[in-house]
Image (cartoon, coloured by chain):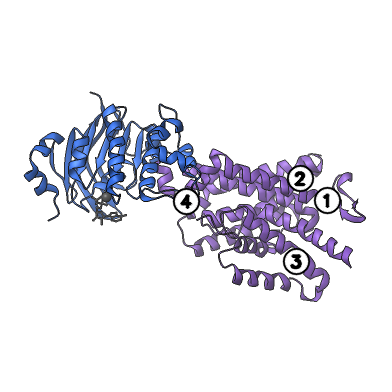
Chain colours: A purple, B blue
Protein backbone atom coordinates (compact mmCIF):
# COMPACT_ATOMS: atom_id res chain seq x y z
CA UNK A 1 0.00 0.00 0.00
CA UNK A 2 2.73 2.45 0.96
CA UNK A 3 4.76 1.29 -2.00
CA UNK A 4 1.75 1.97 -4.20
CA UNK A 5 1.34 5.42 -2.74
CA UNK A 6 4.97 6.29 -3.39
CA UNK A 7 4.71 4.85 -6.87
CA UNK A 8 1.59 6.90 -7.64
CA UNK A 9 3.22 10.02 -6.22
CA UNK A 10 6.31 9.41 -8.31
CA UNK A 11 4.37 8.80 -11.52
CA UNK A 12 2.26 11.86 -10.81
CA UNK A 13 5.32 14.03 -10.35
CA UNK A 14 6.85 12.77 -13.59
CA UNK A 15 3.57 13.38 -15.38
CA UNK A 16 3.26 16.84 -13.84
CA UNK A 17 6.83 17.63 -14.88
CA UNK A 18 5.87 16.99 -18.49
CA UNK A 19 2.79 19.17 -18.20
CA UNK A 20 5.02 21.90 -16.77
CA UNK A 21 7.52 21.88 -19.65
CA UNK A 22 4.71 22.01 -22.18
CA UNK A 23 2.65 24.64 -20.34
CA UNK A 24 5.31 27.10 -19.21
CA UNK A 25 5.32 28.79 -22.63
CA UNK A 26 1.55 29.13 -22.49
CA UNK A 27 1.86 30.73 -19.07
CA UNK A 28 4.07 33.39 -20.63
CA UNK A 29 1.94 34.14 -23.69
CA UNK A 30 -1.33 33.97 -21.81
CA UNK A 31 -0.36 35.44 -18.49
CA UNK A 32 2.17 38.01 -19.54
CA UNK A 33 1.50 38.89 -23.14
CA UNK A 34 -2.23 38.50 -22.46
CA UNK A 35 -2.78 36.25 -25.46
CA UNK A 36 -5.18 33.33 -25.18
CA UNK A 37 -3.33 30.80 -27.29
CA UNK A 38 -5.37 27.63 -27.21
CA UNK A 39 -3.17 26.20 -29.97
CA UNK A 40 -0.18 25.94 -27.67
CA UNK A 41 -0.50 22.14 -27.62
CA UNK A 42 -0.01 22.12 -31.40
CA UNK A 43 3.59 23.20 -30.82
CA UNK A 44 4.02 20.28 -28.44
CA UNK A 45 2.58 17.95 -31.07
CA UNK A 46 4.91 19.40 -33.69
CA UNK A 47 7.83 18.66 -31.37
CA UNK A 48 6.58 15.12 -30.90
CA UNK A 49 6.38 14.44 -34.63
CA UNK A 50 9.75 16.14 -35.19
CA UNK A 51 11.21 13.77 -32.66
CA UNK A 52 9.65 10.74 -34.39
CA UNK A 53 10.84 11.88 -37.85
CA UNK A 54 14.33 12.61 -36.54
CA UNK A 55 14.53 9.07 -35.17
CA UNK A 56 12.85 7.10 -37.96
CA UNK A 57 13.93 9.05 -41.07
CA UNK A 58 17.21 10.61 -39.96
CA UNK A 59 18.19 7.72 -37.72
CA UNK A 60 19.03 9.96 -34.77
CA UNK A 61 19.02 8.44 -31.28
CA UNK A 62 16.23 9.56 -28.94
CA UNK A 63 18.32 12.01 -26.91
CA UNK A 64 19.66 13.70 -30.04
CA UNK A 65 16.17 14.07 -31.47
CA UNK A 66 14.99 16.12 -28.44
CA UNK A 67 16.97 19.25 -29.42
CA UNK A 68 15.53 18.85 -32.93
CA UNK A 69 12.03 18.92 -31.44
CA UNK A 70 12.92 22.09 -29.51
CA UNK A 71 14.39 23.88 -32.53
CA UNK A 72 11.62 22.95 -34.97
CA UNK A 73 8.87 24.10 -32.60
CA UNK A 74 10.77 27.27 -31.68
CA UNK A 75 11.20 28.17 -35.36
CA UNK A 76 7.55 27.45 -36.04
CA UNK A 77 6.78 29.70 -33.08
CA UNK A 78 8.84 32.58 -34.48
CA UNK A 79 7.30 32.29 -37.94
CA UNK A 80 3.71 32.05 -36.71
CA UNK A 81 4.25 34.87 -34.22
CA UNK A 82 5.60 37.16 -36.94
CA UNK A 83 2.95 36.23 -39.49
CA UNK A 84 -0.18 35.67 -37.43
CA UNK A 85 -0.07 36.02 -33.65
CA UNK A 86 1.38 39.53 -33.67
CA UNK A 87 -1.66 40.84 -35.50
CA UNK A 88 -3.92 39.67 -32.70
CA UNK A 89 -2.10 40.98 -29.61
CA UNK A 90 -4.60 43.82 -29.34
CA UNK A 91 -7.58 41.81 -30.54
CA UNK A 92 -10.33 40.72 -28.16
CA UNK A 93 -9.94 37.44 -26.32
CA UNK A 94 -12.80 36.01 -28.36
CA UNK A 95 -10.91 36.70 -31.59
CA UNK A 96 -7.80 35.11 -30.13
CA UNK A 97 -9.74 32.04 -29.04
CA UNK A 98 -11.39 31.64 -32.44
CA UNK A 99 -8.08 32.15 -34.21
CA UNK A 100 -6.21 29.64 -32.09
CA UNK A 101 -9.00 27.04 -32.28
CA UNK A 102 -8.76 27.40 -36.05
CA UNK A 103 -5.03 26.74 -35.78
CA UNK A 104 -5.70 23.59 -33.71
CA UNK A 105 -7.99 22.15 -36.36
CA UNK A 106 -5.48 22.96 -39.09
CA UNK A 107 -2.76 21.25 -37.04
CA UNK A 108 -4.94 18.18 -36.48
CA UNK A 109 -5.85 17.94 -40.17
CA UNK A 110 -2.26 18.52 -41.23
CA UNK A 111 -0.89 15.87 -38.87
CA UNK A 112 -3.54 13.33 -39.92
CA UNK A 113 -2.75 13.91 -43.58
CA UNK A 114 1.01 13.63 -43.07
CA UNK A 115 1.26 10.88 -40.47
CA UNK A 116 -2.13 9.16 -40.30
CA UNK A 117 -4.32 8.97 -37.24
CA UNK A 118 -2.48 6.16 -35.44
CA UNK A 119 -0.39 6.51 -32.29
CA UNK A 120 3.29 7.07 -33.01
CA UNK A 121 5.80 4.67 -31.46
CA UNK A 122 8.95 5.86 -29.75
CA UNK A 123 12.08 3.79 -29.18
CA UNK A 124 13.67 4.79 -25.93
CA UNK A 125 17.33 3.98 -25.43
CA UNK A 126 17.98 0.92 -23.25
CA UNK A 127 19.16 2.86 -20.24
CA UNK A 128 15.85 4.72 -20.09
CA UNK A 129 13.79 1.56 -20.15
CA UNK A 130 12.92 -0.68 -17.26
CA UNK A 131 13.16 0.09 -13.58
CA UNK A 132 15.70 1.57 -11.25
CA UNK A 133 15.77 0.21 -7.72
CA UNK A 134 16.15 2.86 -5.02
CA UNK A 135 15.78 2.06 -1.30
CA UNK A 136 13.98 -1.18 -2.09
CA UNK A 137 11.43 0.51 -4.35
CA UNK A 138 11.25 0.30 -8.14
CA UNK A 139 11.06 3.49 -10.12
CA UNK A 140 10.56 3.76 -13.87
CA UNK A 141 13.88 4.87 -15.36
CA UNK A 142 12.19 7.08 -17.94
CA UNK A 143 10.06 8.86 -15.34
CA UNK A 144 13.15 9.49 -13.26
CA UNK A 145 14.79 10.94 -16.37
CA UNK A 146 11.80 13.25 -16.94
CA UNK A 147 12.06 14.61 -13.42
CA UNK A 148 15.79 15.27 -13.82
CA UNK A 149 15.21 17.08 -17.12
CA UNK A 150 12.51 19.26 -15.62
CA UNK A 151 14.66 20.19 -12.63
CA UNK A 152 17.42 21.22 -15.04
CA UNK A 153 15.05 23.22 -17.24
CA UNK A 154 13.47 24.96 -14.27
CA UNK A 155 16.87 26.03 -12.96
CA UNK A 156 17.97 27.23 -16.41
CA UNK A 157 14.74 29.16 -16.96
CA UNK A 158 14.90 30.77 -13.54
CA UNK A 159 18.46 31.84 -14.24
CA UNK A 160 17.49 33.21 -17.65
CA UNK A 161 14.55 35.24 -16.37
CA UNK A 162 15.98 36.38 -13.03
CA UNK A 163 19.66 36.83 -13.80
CA UNK A 164 20.23 37.83 -17.42
CA UNK A 165 19.65 41.06 -19.27
CA UNK A 166 17.30 39.28 -21.63
CA UNK A 167 15.23 38.15 -18.66
CA UNK A 168 15.11 41.70 -17.33
CA UNK A 169 14.02 42.89 -20.79
CA UNK A 170 11.19 40.37 -20.76
CA UNK A 171 10.05 41.49 -17.31
CA UNK A 172 10.33 45.19 -18.20
CA UNK A 173 8.43 44.70 -21.47
CA UNK A 174 5.68 42.87 -19.65
CA UNK A 175 5.49 45.51 -16.91
CA UNK A 176 5.23 48.41 -19.34
CA UNK A 177 5.66 48.07 -23.09
CA UNK A 178 5.59 51.79 -23.79
CA UNK A 179 8.20 52.68 -21.18
CA UNK A 180 10.42 49.79 -22.28
CA UNK A 181 10.30 50.87 -25.93
CA UNK A 182 10.85 54.49 -24.88
CA UNK A 183 14.07 53.44 -23.18
CA UNK A 184 15.43 51.52 -26.16
CA UNK A 185 14.21 47.97 -25.57
CA UNK A 186 13.11 46.23 -28.78
CA UNK A 187 9.87 44.95 -27.29
CA UNK A 188 8.72 43.18 -30.46
CA UNK A 189 11.91 41.19 -30.63
CA UNK A 190 11.74 40.36 -26.93
CA UNK A 191 8.21 39.01 -27.38
CA UNK A 192 9.21 37.06 -30.52
CA UNK A 193 12.07 35.39 -28.70
CA UNK A 194 9.93 34.68 -25.68
CA UNK A 195 7.26 33.15 -27.86
CA UNK A 196 9.91 31.05 -29.60
CA UNK A 197 11.31 29.87 -26.29
CA UNK A 198 7.85 28.90 -25.04
CA UNK A 199 7.04 27.08 -28.28
CA UNK A 200 10.42 25.34 -28.23
CA UNK A 201 9.87 24.10 -24.67
CA UNK A 202 6.42 22.86 -25.67
CA UNK A 203 8.06 21.01 -28.56
CA UNK A 204 10.65 19.53 -26.23
CA UNK A 205 7.84 18.47 -23.90
CA UNK A 206 5.98 16.93 -26.84
CA UNK A 207 9.04 14.86 -27.71
CA UNK A 208 9.68 13.85 -24.13
CA UNK A 209 6.00 13.03 -23.70
CA UNK A 210 5.48 10.56 -26.55
CA UNK A 211 6.14 7.66 -24.20
CA UNK A 212 3.87 8.98 -21.45
CA UNK A 213 1.14 11.07 -23.12
CA UNK A 214 1.14 9.33 -26.48
CA UNK A 215 1.23 11.08 -29.83
CA UNK A 216 -1.53 11.23 -32.41
CA UNK A 217 -3.15 14.11 -34.31
CA UNK A 218 -5.72 14.84 -31.60
CA UNK A 219 -2.97 15.67 -29.09
CA UNK A 220 -3.52 19.49 -29.05
CA UNK A 221 -7.21 19.06 -28.27
CA UNK A 222 -6.88 16.12 -25.88
CA UNK A 223 -4.53 17.96 -23.51
CA UNK A 224 -5.71 21.53 -24.04
CA UNK A 225 -7.66 21.60 -20.79
CA UNK A 226 -4.63 20.37 -18.84
CA UNK A 227 -2.38 23.12 -20.18
CA UNK A 228 -5.02 25.76 -19.48
CA UNK A 229 -5.50 24.43 -15.95
CA UNK A 230 -1.78 24.65 -15.23
CA UNK A 231 -1.79 28.30 -16.24
CA UNK A 232 -5.06 29.18 -14.53
CA UNK A 233 -4.13 27.52 -11.25
CA UNK A 234 -0.43 28.44 -11.33
CA UNK A 235 -0.95 32.11 -11.89
CA UNK A 236 0.89 34.13 -14.46
CA UNK A 237 4.30 35.66 -14.51
CA UNK A 238 6.31 33.27 -12.39
CA UNK A 239 8.01 29.96 -13.01
CA UNK A 240 7.18 28.54 -9.58
CA UNK A 241 3.41 28.92 -9.92
CA UNK A 242 2.91 26.78 -13.04
CA UNK A 243 5.49 24.30 -11.70
CA UNK A 244 3.55 23.67 -8.48
CA UNK A 245 0.24 23.65 -10.36
CA UNK A 246 1.52 21.12 -12.90
CA UNK A 247 2.90 18.85 -10.16
CA UNK A 248 -0.33 18.96 -8.15
CA UNK A 249 -2.37 18.37 -11.29
CA UNK A 250 -0.12 15.46 -12.28
CA UNK A 251 -0.26 13.78 -8.88
CA UNK A 252 -4.03 14.09 -8.49
CA UNK A 253 -4.66 12.93 -12.06
CA UNK A 254 -2.53 9.81 -11.63
CA UNK A 255 -3.87 9.14 -8.13
CA UNK A 256 -7.48 9.64 -9.22
CA UNK A 257 -7.14 7.26 -12.13
CA UNK A 258 -5.39 4.69 -9.93
CA UNK A 259 -7.60 4.74 -6.84
CA UNK A 260 -11.00 5.77 -8.29
CA UNK A 261 -10.79 4.90 -11.98
CA UNK A 262 -14.58 5.11 -12.36
CA UNK A 263 -14.38 8.90 -11.86
CA UNK A 264 -11.87 9.35 -14.71
CA UNK A 265 -10.61 12.91 -15.04
CA UNK A 266 -13.32 14.19 -12.72
CA UNK A 267 -10.93 14.20 -9.76
CA UNK A 268 -8.61 16.82 -11.19
CA UNK A 269 -11.46 19.11 -12.16
CA UNK A 270 -12.70 19.06 -8.59
CA UNK A 271 -9.19 19.67 -7.24
CA UNK A 272 -8.61 22.51 -9.67
CA UNK A 273 -11.91 24.20 -8.94
CA UNK A 274 -11.16 23.95 -5.23
CA UNK A 275 -7.73 25.47 -5.72
CA UNK A 276 -9.08 28.30 -7.82
CA UNK A 277 -11.60 29.05 -5.07
CA UNK A 278 -8.84 29.18 -2.47
CA UNK A 279 -6.27 30.99 -4.67
CA UNK A 280 -8.25 33.05 -7.18
CA UNK A 281 -5.07 34.83 -8.34
CA UNK A 282 -3.25 31.56 -8.89
CA UNK A 283 -0.88 29.78 -6.52
CA UNK A 284 1.89 32.33 -6.87
CA UNK A 285 0.74 35.80 -7.84
CA UNK A 286 2.94 38.07 -9.88
CA UNK A 287 5.45 40.02 -7.86
CA UNK A 288 3.61 43.24 -7.38
CA UNK B 1 26.40 74.84 -33.22
CA UNK B 2 25.13 71.68 -34.89
CA UNK B 3 21.40 71.06 -34.84
CA UNK B 4 20.61 68.02 -32.77
CA UNK B 5 16.84 67.98 -33.02
CA UNK B 6 14.67 69.99 -35.30
CA UNK B 7 10.90 69.91 -35.19
CA UNK B 8 9.03 71.66 -37.99
CA UNK B 9 5.33 72.40 -37.91
CA UNK B 10 4.40 69.33 -35.88
CA UNK B 11 0.69 68.57 -35.79
CA UNK B 12 -0.03 65.57 -33.60
CA UNK B 13 -2.51 64.02 -31.21
CA UNK B 14 -4.17 60.82 -30.13
CA UNK B 15 -6.42 58.89 -32.51
CA UNK B 16 -8.57 61.46 -34.26
CA UNK B 17 -8.10 64.27 -31.75
CA UNK B 18 -5.44 66.85 -32.47
CA UNK B 19 -3.52 68.24 -29.48
CA UNK B 20 -0.50 69.98 -31.03
CA UNK B 21 -0.73 72.33 -33.99
CA UNK B 22 2.14 73.64 -36.06
CA UNK B 23 4.75 73.39 -33.33
CA UNK B 24 8.32 74.18 -34.44
CA UNK B 25 11.53 74.40 -32.42
CA UNK B 26 15.14 73.33 -32.49
CA UNK B 27 17.66 72.07 -29.98
CA UNK B 28 21.42 72.34 -30.45
CA UNK B 29 23.87 69.73 -29.27
CA UNK B 30 24.51 70.57 -25.62
CA UNK B 31 21.67 73.12 -25.66
CA UNK B 32 18.84 73.51 -23.17
CA UNK B 33 15.20 74.34 -23.69
CA UNK B 34 12.45 75.05 -21.19
CA UNK B 35 9.03 73.90 -22.36
CA UNK B 36 6.42 75.86 -20.43
CA UNK B 37 2.68 76.24 -20.35
CA UNK B 38 -0.36 75.61 -18.18
CA UNK B 39 -1.70 72.21 -17.37
CA UNK B 40 -3.14 70.39 -20.36
CA UNK B 41 -1.67 72.57 -23.12
CA UNK B 42 0.25 69.68 -24.69
CA UNK B 43 3.75 69.65 -23.16
CA UNK B 44 3.74 65.94 -22.41
CA UNK B 45 2.17 65.26 -25.79
CA UNK B 46 5.06 67.11 -27.43
CA UNK B 47 7.66 64.93 -25.67
CA UNK B 48 5.66 61.80 -26.53
CA UNK B 49 5.59 62.95 -30.14
CA UNK B 50 9.40 63.22 -30.13
CA UNK B 51 9.47 59.61 -28.85
CA UNK B 52 7.04 58.46 -31.54
CA UNK B 53 4.32 57.63 -29.04
CA UNK B 54 1.54 59.82 -30.45
CA UNK B 55 -0.09 60.04 -33.85
CA UNK B 56 1.85 62.56 -35.97
CA UNK B 57 -0.51 64.05 -38.55
CA UNK B 58 1.97 66.29 -40.33
CA UNK B 59 5.29 68.02 -39.89
CA UNK B 60 8.94 67.06 -39.97
CA UNK B 61 11.15 65.72 -37.26
CA UNK B 62 14.85 65.38 -37.82
CA UNK B 63 17.61 64.14 -35.58
CA UNK B 64 21.22 64.95 -36.41
CA UNK B 65 20.06 65.87 -39.89
CA UNK B 66 18.17 62.62 -40.59
CA UNK B 67 14.39 62.26 -40.84
CA UNK B 68 13.11 60.17 -37.91
CA UNK B 69 9.36 60.45 -38.47
CA UNK B 70 9.06 56.77 -39.27
CA UNK B 71 11.67 55.54 -36.80
CA UNK B 72 10.17 53.20 -34.18
CA UNK B 73 10.23 54.36 -30.58
CA UNK B 74 12.98 52.03 -29.35
CA UNK B 75 15.29 53.17 -32.17
CA UNK B 76 14.77 56.81 -31.21
CA UNK B 77 15.80 55.93 -27.67
CA UNK B 78 18.82 54.06 -29.01
CA UNK B 79 19.70 57.05 -31.19
CA UNK B 80 20.03 59.23 -28.09
CA UNK B 81 16.65 60.47 -26.89
CA UNK B 82 16.63 59.95 -23.12
CA UNK B 83 13.03 59.96 -21.92
CA UNK B 84 12.08 60.70 -18.31
CA UNK B 85 8.30 60.24 -18.40
CA UNK B 86 5.98 62.35 -16.30
CA UNK B 87 4.42 59.18 -14.85
CA UNK B 88 7.92 57.80 -14.11
CA UNK B 89 6.84 54.33 -15.22
CA UNK B 90 8.82 52.22 -12.77
CA UNK B 91 9.02 48.50 -13.53
CA UNK B 92 7.48 46.62 -10.56
CA UNK B 93 9.27 43.36 -11.49
CA UNK B 94 12.74 44.89 -11.68
CA UNK B 95 15.09 45.89 -8.91
CA UNK B 96 16.54 49.39 -8.87
CA UNK B 97 19.82 48.08 -10.24
CA UNK B 98 18.03 46.12 -12.96
CA UNK B 99 16.25 49.33 -14.04
CA UNK B 100 19.71 50.66 -14.77
CA UNK B 101 21.32 47.62 -16.34
CA UNK B 102 18.39 46.66 -18.55
CA UNK B 103 18.58 49.89 -20.58
CA UNK B 104 22.36 50.42 -20.40
CA UNK B 105 24.08 51.45 -23.62
CA UNK B 106 27.77 52.20 -24.12
CA UNK B 107 28.97 55.68 -23.19
CA UNK B 108 30.21 57.79 -20.30
CA UNK B 109 27.33 56.84 -17.99
CA UNK B 110 27.75 53.65 -15.99
CA UNK B 111 25.97 52.30 -12.95
CA UNK B 112 28.88 53.43 -10.75
CA UNK B 113 28.69 56.98 -12.08
CA UNK B 114 24.92 57.13 -11.71
CA UNK B 115 25.29 56.04 -8.07
CA UNK B 116 27.73 58.91 -7.48
CA UNK B 117 25.01 61.36 -8.46
CA UNK B 118 22.22 59.46 -6.71
CA UNK B 119 23.72 57.67 -3.66
CA UNK B 120 20.18 56.90 -2.40
CA UNK B 121 19.66 54.60 -5.34
CA UNK B 122 22.68 52.54 -4.41
CA UNK B 123 21.25 52.04 -0.89
CA UNK B 124 18.03 50.85 -2.50
CA UNK B 125 19.55 48.83 -5.32
CA UNK B 126 17.87 45.56 -4.32
CA UNK B 127 14.42 47.13 -3.94
CA UNK B 128 11.77 46.61 -6.59
CA UNK B 129 10.54 49.52 -8.69
CA UNK B 130 7.29 49.82 -6.77
CA UNK B 131 8.94 49.86 -3.35
CA UNK B 132 10.34 53.39 -3.71
CA UNK B 133 9.21 56.78 -2.45
CA UNK B 134 8.15 59.42 -4.97
CA UNK B 135 11.53 61.15 -4.79
CA UNK B 136 13.43 57.91 -5.24
CA UNK B 137 11.23 57.01 -8.20
CA UNK B 138 12.03 60.33 -9.83
CA UNK B 139 15.75 59.86 -9.23
CA UNK B 140 15.54 56.38 -10.71
CA UNK B 141 13.61 57.64 -13.74
CA UNK B 142 16.39 60.17 -14.40
CA UNK B 143 19.18 57.70 -13.62
CA UNK B 144 17.61 55.14 -15.94
CA UNK B 145 17.49 57.64 -18.81
CA UNK B 146 21.13 58.57 -18.15
CA UNK B 147 22.10 54.90 -18.47
CA UNK B 148 20.95 55.00 -22.11
CA UNK B 149 23.71 57.59 -22.59
CA UNK B 150 21.41 60.13 -24.21
CA UNK B 151 22.33 63.08 -26.39
CA UNK B 152 19.10 64.80 -25.43
CA UNK B 153 17.43 64.33 -22.06
CA UNK B 154 13.65 64.86 -21.96
CA UNK B 155 12.59 65.77 -18.42
CA UNK B 156 8.81 65.85 -17.97
CA UNK B 157 7.96 67.67 -14.71
CA UNK B 158 10.79 66.17 -12.67
CA UNK B 159 9.77 68.10 -9.52
CA UNK B 160 6.07 67.22 -9.60
CA UNK B 161 4.71 66.01 -6.27
CA UNK B 162 8.04 66.01 -4.42
CA UNK B 163 8.74 67.42 -0.97
CA UNK B 164 10.63 70.75 -1.08
CA UNK B 165 13.77 69.27 0.45
CA UNK B 166 13.91 66.63 -2.27
CA UNK B 167 13.25 69.24 -4.94
CA UNK B 168 16.36 71.08 -3.71
CA UNK B 169 18.44 67.92 -3.83
CA UNK B 170 17.24 66.98 -7.29
CA UNK B 171 17.58 70.51 -8.60
CA UNK B 172 21.24 70.56 -7.60
CA UNK B 173 21.94 67.39 -9.54
CA UNK B 174 19.92 68.36 -12.62
CA UNK B 175 21.57 71.80 -12.64
CA UNK B 176 25.01 70.22 -12.56
CA UNK B 177 24.11 67.84 -15.36
CA UNK B 178 22.67 70.56 -17.59
CA UNK B 179 25.52 73.01 -17.01
CA UNK B 180 28.14 70.33 -17.68
CA UNK B 181 26.76 70.33 -21.24
CA UNK B 182 27.38 66.61 -21.76
CA UNK B 183 23.99 66.36 -23.38
CA UNK B 184 21.19 68.66 -24.42
CA UNK B 185 18.03 68.85 -22.35
CA UNK B 186 14.37 69.78 -22.65
CA UNK B 187 12.80 70.60 -19.29
CA UNK B 188 9.03 70.62 -18.84
CA UNK B 189 8.10 72.20 -15.54
CA UNK B 190 5.07 73.67 -13.80
CA UNK B 191 7.46 75.76 -11.69
CA UNK B 192 8.37 77.96 -14.65
CA UNK B 193 11.08 79.89 -12.82
CA UNK B 194 12.90 76.70 -11.89
CA UNK B 195 12.97 75.58 -15.51
CA UNK B 196 14.07 79.00 -16.72
CA UNK B 197 17.03 79.20 -14.36
CA UNK B 198 18.18 75.82 -15.67
CA UNK B 199 17.96 76.57 -19.39
CA UNK B 200 19.09 78.99 -22.10
CA UNK B 201 16.06 78.94 -24.41
CA UNK B 202 12.36 78.76 -23.67
CA UNK B 203 9.13 78.16 -25.54
CA UNK B 204 5.65 78.51 -24.10
CA UNK B 205 2.71 76.46 -25.35
CA UNK B 206 -0.94 77.35 -25.12
CA UNK B 207 -3.67 75.03 -26.39
CA UNK B 208 -1.20 73.10 -28.48
CA UNK B 209 0.48 76.07 -30.11
CA UNK B 210 3.72 77.96 -29.47
CA UNK B 211 2.72 81.37 -28.12
CA UNK B 212 6.10 82.64 -27.03
CA UNK B 213 9.76 81.92 -27.67
CA UNK B 214 12.81 83.72 -26.30
CA UNK B 215 15.95 83.30 -24.24
CA UNK B 216 15.09 81.93 -20.79
CA UNK B 217 16.80 84.92 -19.20
CA UNK B 218 14.49 87.24 -21.10
CA UNK B 219 11.40 85.64 -19.57
CA UNK B 220 12.93 85.71 -16.11
CA UNK B 221 13.43 89.47 -16.49
CA UNK B 222 9.79 90.01 -17.38
CA UNK B 223 7.76 88.34 -14.67
CA UNK B 224 4.55 90.02 -15.83
CA UNK B 225 4.90 88.38 -19.29
CA UNK B 226 5.71 85.07 -17.67
CA UNK B 227 2.67 85.31 -15.40
CA UNK B 228 0.41 86.18 -18.29
CA UNK B 229 1.70 83.17 -20.26
CA UNK B 230 1.82 80.45 -17.67
CA UNK B 231 0.03 81.48 -14.51
CA UNK B 232 -3.13 79.58 -13.74
CA UNK B 233 -5.99 81.81 -14.89
N1 LIG C 1 -3.58 59.38 -24.14
C1 LIG C 1 -4.36 60.44 -24.45
N2 LIG C 1 -5.44 60.29 -25.26
C2 LIG C 1 -6.22 61.33 -25.59
N3 LIG C 1 -6.02 62.60 -25.17
C3 LIG C 1 -4.96 62.82 -24.37
C4 LIG C 1 -4.07 61.76 -23.97
N4 LIG C 1 -3.11 62.29 -23.18
C5 LIG C 1 -3.39 63.60 -23.10
N5 LIG C 1 -4.48 63.94 -23.81
C6 LIG C 1 -5.07 65.29 -23.96
O1 LIG C 1 -4.10 66.10 -24.60
C7 LIG C 1 -4.11 67.39 -24.04
C8 LIG C 1 -2.69 67.76 -23.62
O2 LIG C 1 -2.28 66.93 -22.55
P1 LIG C 1 -0.80 66.90 -22.06
O3 LIG C 1 0.10 66.81 -23.23
O4 LIG C 1 -0.69 65.83 -21.05
O5 LIG C 1 -0.65 68.33 -21.39
P2 LIG C 1 0.45 68.87 -20.38
O6 LIG C 1 1.57 67.90 -20.32
O7 LIG C 1 0.86 70.17 -20.96
O8 LIG C 1 -0.23 69.05 -19.07
C9 LIG C 1 -5.10 67.38 -22.90
O9 LIG C 1 -6.29 67.96 -23.35
C10 LIG C 1 -5.31 65.94 -22.60
O10 LIG C 1 -6.63 65.69 -22.18
MG1 LIG D 1 2.26 66.82 -18.74
- Determine the chain carrying the residue at label 3: A
Gap in Å between the C-alphas at discs 4 and 1? 40 Å
Q: Which mark is residue A78?
A: none
On the same chain: label 2 and label 3?
Answer: yes
- Mark 4 C-beta closer than 8 Å to ligand 1: no
Q: Secondary structure at mark 2?
A: helix
Q: Which residue, given by chain and number where applicable, does mark 2 sit on?
A: A53
In the depicted view, which residue is nearer to us: A50 or B190?
B190
Residues indicated by labels 2 and 4 sit on the same polypeptide chain? no
How many neighbours does mark 4 have within 10 angstroms: few (below 14), some (14-19), or many (20 or more)? Answer: many
- Mark 4 or mark 1, whichever is nearer to me: 4
Measured in 3D between alpha carbons, the distance from the residue under mark 2 to the one under mark 4, in whole angstroms, is 44 Å
CA separation in Å, label 4 and label 3? 36 Å
Query: Residue sitting at 44 percent across and 48 percent down?
Result: A177
Q: CA distance from mark 2 to mark 3?
A: 30 Å
Looking at the image, residue B96 lies above or below residue B31: below
Residue beneath disc 4: B92
User: Would you name the residue on which mark 1 appears?
Assistant: A142
Query: What element does badge 1 sit on?
Result: helix
Amino acid sequence: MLGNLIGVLFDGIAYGSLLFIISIGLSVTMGLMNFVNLAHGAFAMLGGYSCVIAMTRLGLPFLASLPVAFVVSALAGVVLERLLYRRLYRATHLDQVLFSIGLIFMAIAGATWLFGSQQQPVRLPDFLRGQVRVLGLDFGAYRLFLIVVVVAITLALTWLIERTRFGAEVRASVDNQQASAGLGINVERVFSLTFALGSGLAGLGGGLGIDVLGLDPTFPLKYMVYFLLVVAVGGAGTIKGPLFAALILGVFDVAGKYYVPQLGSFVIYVVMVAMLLVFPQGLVGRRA
Amino acid sequence: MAKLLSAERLTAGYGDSIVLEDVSFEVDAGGSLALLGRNGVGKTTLLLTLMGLTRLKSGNLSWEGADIVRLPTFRRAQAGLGWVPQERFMFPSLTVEEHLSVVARPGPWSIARVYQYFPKLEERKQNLGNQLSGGEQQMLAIARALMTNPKLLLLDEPMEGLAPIIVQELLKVIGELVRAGEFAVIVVEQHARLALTLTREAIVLDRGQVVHRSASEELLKHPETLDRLVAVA
